[in-house]
Amino acid sequence: MSKRVMVRDVAVGGGAPVSIQSMTNVDSRDEKGLIEQIARLKDAGCEIIRIAVPDQESLDVFGSIRNKTDMPLVADIHFDYRLAIGSIKAGADKIRINPGNIGSPERVKAVVDVAKEHGIPIRVGVNSGSLEKDIVAKNNGVTAEGLAESALRNLKLIEDMGYDDLVVSIKSSNVAMNYQAHQIAAAKTEHPFHIGITEAGTVRRGKVKSAAGVGALLLSGIGDTIRVSLTADPCEEVYFAKEILEAIGLRKSKFDIVSCPTCGRTRIDLESLASDVENRLAAMDDLPEGLKIAVMGCVVNGPGEAAEADYGACGGDGKGVIIAQGKVIKTVDEKDIADELIKTIREGK
């Protein structure tokens, strides 16, 4: 089990639930825009929000925002150690730095000393796009071994300065390399991991890469907080992160729908039926958490899947059966399947 750090009131590591992060993408000097986006992210279910702090003006805005939200805020710093120190003093709950681009060890130590004074964690970030030149040369390019080596080197640098309140982040856009680097590093450190696939791409492609990369790591026991990186509204990152956690059982979903992919045996419009049921369930405010609903299209796997769900429907030849708690309770016309299934769920039969 990894060590635990606190990002304001959110525990990261040490067996705490995997938390969801995102990063604002409006201009960091736009206070009104940031406040609005932070509120939207909070409503979407984001638990930790990162803000880039590239200059003094954005630092001033960061300090002002800190007084206007109770959300855990992470200051993302590159190159200028003074901005890292300023962000901590302005109330950052965590800072993200890459020690390799902050400057000399003396400058890194100056940041570490202030973080220690204020008792906030440091996320040590390593990215395949900014790997140290000597490590790239040693490995004849960017490799999983090199990424892990860089992460462990930078962790040790700060540990040797007497500070252990750290989160490690290794990011690559290459899913396999990302996975392998984490496997190597996780065997050699107990610090909590912030995981994700960097620069994963557009919503369509990025979701595929993130599901594969983040899901594989979590299923192997690695990952304490996650960010899905998409070229999109950051709220989309939060929604999809929740879906990943629900899909692998790390969070309870409001409901789970099981529906078959259809084949030549299908005799009802299953695609429309399943979508209709899903949309209507999503709109139900009083739906008990964690229900499993099966919407199946033929008699081969349908009855069995529906019987294993809390509620289900299995259709064929213009008809459908409604199943509750493993028992068939009625047969209805195809046009009535959705209505009768929802009615049965509402009645809790």
Image (tube, rainbow, N blue to C red):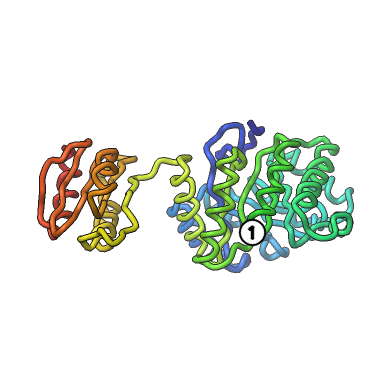
Q: Position of residue 119 (x, y in %)?
A: 70, 38
- Residue annotated with mark 1: 198
Report whether 98 appears left or right of 282: right
Q: In which quadrant of the rendered image does the N terminus lie?
A: top right
Of residues 129 and 267, the one nearer the viewer is: 267
Q: Position of residue 34 (x, y in %)?
A: 55, 62
Report whether 138 appears left or right of 66: right
Say what secondary structure mark 1 lies in: loop
Of residues 243 and 327, the one nearer the viewer is: 327
Q: Compared to 194, does 64 lie above or below? A: below
Quadrant housing residue 273: bottom left
Q: Position of residue 53 (x, y in %)?
A: 68, 60
Of residues 228 and 98, the one nearer the viewer is: 228
Report whether 19 appears left or right of 340: right
Q: Residue at x 13, y 60 (%)?
A: 335
Q: Position of residue 190 (x, y in %)?
A: 70, 34
Amino acid carrying mark 1 in the image: Thr
Quadrant housing residue 186: top right
Report whether 67 appears left or right of 304: right
Q: In which quadrant of the rendered image does the C terminus lie?
A: top left
Q: Residues within 10 Å of mark 1 (few under 14, many from 20)?
A: many
Q: Residue at x 27, y 41 (%)?
A: 304
Of residues 105 and 330, the one nearer the viewer is: 330
